[in-house]
Image (cartoon, rainbow, N blue to C red):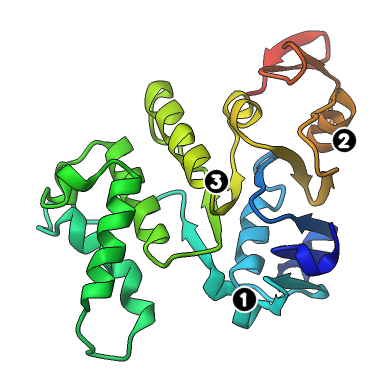
Amino acid sequence: MTAADAVIEVEGLWAGYDHEDVLEDVNFTVAPLDFVGLIGPNGGGKTTLIKVLLGLLPPTRGWVRIMGKPVAEGRRHIGYVPQQVDFDRDFPIRVWDVVRMGRLGERRLLQRFTAEDDEAVAEALDSMALFPLQDRPIGKLSSGQRQRVYIARALVTEPDILLLDEPTASVDPQVSTAIYELLQQLNSHVTILLISHDMSAVSSHVKTIGCLNRRLFYHNEKQLTAEMLEQVYQCPVDLIAHGVPHRVFADHGGERGADD
């Protein structure tokens, strides 16, 4: 893959807060229609990387390109799904209206929604199997249904890249699997970059895996080795799986505990 083909390019990136860097010399290239899973410990810089990609945090060194453009221009190609969305569950807003909010960036102030907007909303709802729930108040949905609404809201912008921060953190395993399967379907036409702590889900569904703990260990492949994990989690690990790890056990002073 040449640089001209990449949808995301990160080179020599340093970024952080209050003159303290959280990301150190991150280099990263994402190919079109890749499905990238990034794992790593809390405080390792995953959220910081998201902020840089969205243009919310400027690098202290290095540069980023989105669809070959500087972040300020390229971020319009990104649909973003945050980890948590705070809202008043008693506020009577319909699923349709929440998803349609994703179209607000496409219009001038006070401009009415168009038939094209409504068509995009309907397609996004249908892709997330939510069309029958379009008139349901969002506060009446399950956590898994709400998460699919937020993904649909990101999709309604018709992005080239979908960026998700822990999309299954608040749902049970069965719902998590269903969401990952929907994401795999979307990956036929959208590049996906996903942040997660769920190694088993990531290893089962993504195409390539990276480990981030201030520095990024990424080789544009799905292989996740014990050496990569030891560098990221900074402790010895044993992998239990066939080919791709599904569980990590860390050795801390003679005790062995799960670090999923």
Q: Estimate the x, y position of residue 187 in percent, counting from the top left.
A: 55, 46
Distance, label 3 to label 2, CA atoms, is 29 Å
- Which residue is drawn at the image coordinates 49% and 62% (left, top)? 79
User: What element does badge 2 sit on?
Assistant: helix
Instruction: Note whether 200 is above or below 207 in the view shown.
Output: above
Instruction: Note whether 230 is above or below 242 in the view shown.
Output: below
**Crowd rating for badge 1 (residues with CA inside 10 Å; few <14, some 14–19, many 20+):** some
Q: Which of marks 1 and 2 is in front?
A: 1
Task: Locate the C terminus by quadrant.
Answer: top right
Which residue position holds label 3?
Answer: 187
Q: Estimate the x, y position of residue 238 in percent, counting from the top left.
A: 81, 14
Circle number at residue 231: 2
Of labels 3 and 2, earlier in sequence is 3
Q: Estimate the x, y position of residue 92 in percent, counting from the top left.
A: 9, 58
- Which residue is drawn at the image coordinates 85% and 63% (left, top)? 2
Three-letter code for the amino acid on which mark 3 is drawn? Asn
Answer whether labels 1 and 2 touch (C-beta < 8 Å). no
Which residue position holds label 1?
Answer: 74
